[in-house]
Amino acid sequence: MQTMENKWEMLEQTSESREKIWSRNRTFAADVWFRLCRKPTAVAGLLMILLFMLFALVGPFLTSYSYSDQSLEMVNIPPVMKVYDVGSCRVYITPSLKLIRVDENGSLTGMLPVVRYEHEKSMTIFDCDGKEVALYYGRSVYVVCDEATGNIYPAGHIWNHDHLLGTDALGRDILARLMYGTRVSLMVAFVSVLVNLVIGILYGGISGFLGGMVDAVMMRIVDIISTIPLTLYVILIMMVFGQGLQSIIIALGLVYWVDMARVVRGQVLSLKQQEFVLAARTIGSSSRTILLQHLIPNAMGSILVTATMLIPSAIFMEAFLGYLGIGLRPPLASLGTMCNDANANLRTSPHELLIPALVICLIMFAFNFLGDGMRDALDPKLKK
């Protein structure tokens, strides 16, 4: 009988196989992408950002409404409506105590005409296909009932097919305004961060590379700029350029680069003492070449992480300015102006404020998750 030891044989091992590295060769960018894909939160953040960009860029072409289209008959209608079945038709009670006809699919087909007012009964009588329907508004109770018997018609909830997220105080479609508002907020953030990258990298790189008195003077300028509130910048710029999108972009571009400049300066100060900089000087490289081709590329990891973190900050600042009423001009929409418009109807229509506020939170979470993932993926010390 064959023993167990006879089934095992020693494999041949050569010096070449011992020296071979059994791993796939990757470039630095491919290695960063590989490690980024291993972080679920970073992947989720990236997917959310792509979805919001698709929502903002492609969404307006898929809806029949614009951000400025108004319908005073369809004011403050929620996404889920409570409708009453009166037999011949279904009706919904608006916040202005009017009745709107709703078909079985959830589409709004128009207001019912008023027949008469019965103030002593706290009723308004409407005509629904030749049938008189009473809207009772007494004792803070709003129901649709039969005038003669007082019986309340059966009610149910149905999704608003025409306005999936409802309408605001001027009858504008919230979904359409949310698409345009997300587009404006993302555009403001990306443009301001691009300006910050250019100014912050050059300013911080020059300050850290030259050092000495030049560095001290340049950093004191940064300190002075950072101590002045951003709101004051916006107000001063709006006095010159007027209220609008360009004023917000200019204000963010003039202020937000100070954080990027500090990060780049710190990286350049630590990198310029390395051996590769001394080697570049030895072969006769100019200061411009050392700064642009050696120091800044080696600091690109911290630069990208800082830029990723500045984007949600810029989005929040734009929303904050719009919420204060010093953002875009009406009827232009942004996430901040939508929150500002919803303040007046917070008690009766809270969804008008919750929806854009939720989008702001999701965008900020997405960029923060992506920034954390990029920080870990770009740090070689965290490589496993």
Image (tube, helix red, strand yellow):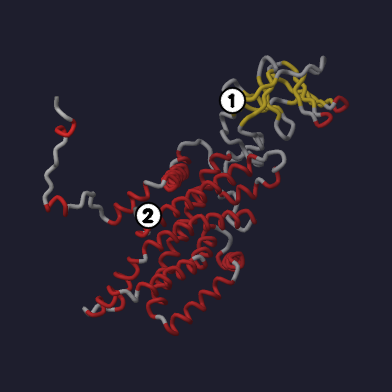
Q: Residue at x 21, y 49 (%)?
A: 22
Q: Which mark is residue 54?
A: none
Task: Judge left or right: residue 134 versus residue 283.
Answer: right
Quadrant housing residue 83: top right
Q: CA distance from mark 2 to mark 1?
A: 48 Å
Which residue is the site of mark 2?
377
Q: In the rendered structure, which disc, 2 or 1, sits on the residue that comes first in sequence?
A: 1
Position of 5 with respect to 313 (left or right) is left
* In the image, farthest residue toward the right: 120
Looking at the rendered structure, the kind of residue marked 1 is: Gly
Q: Quadrant of residue 78?
A: top right
Dot 1: few (<14), some (14–19), or many (≥20) neighbours within 10 Å? Answer: many
Above or below for 291 versus 344: below
Look at 42% across and 69% down and name the residue there.
Answer: 264
Where residue 52 appears, as percent x and y from the top left, is 47, 44
| Residue 204 in view in this figure | yes
Q: Nearer the viewer, residue 193 or 276?
A: 276
Residue 81 in percent (x, y) is at 65, 29
- In the rendered view, would you say 301 is above or below 34? below
Task: Give the percent coordinates (x, y) of residue 85.
Answer: 68, 18
Per the image, the residue denoted by label 1 is 106
In depth, the one of 240 and 298 nearer the eye is 298
Which three-letter amino acid code belongs to the residue tagged 2?
A: Ala
Q: Residues within 10 Å of mark 2 (few under 14, many from 20)?
A: many
- Asked if the residue under mark 1 is in contact with the one under mark 2, i.e. CB atoms within 8 Å, the reply is no
Occupied quadrant, residue 135: top right
Residue 57, visible in the rendered structure? no
Q: Position of residue 136 (x, y in %)?
A: 79, 25
Q: Give the residue drawn at x 45%, y 46%.
A: 41
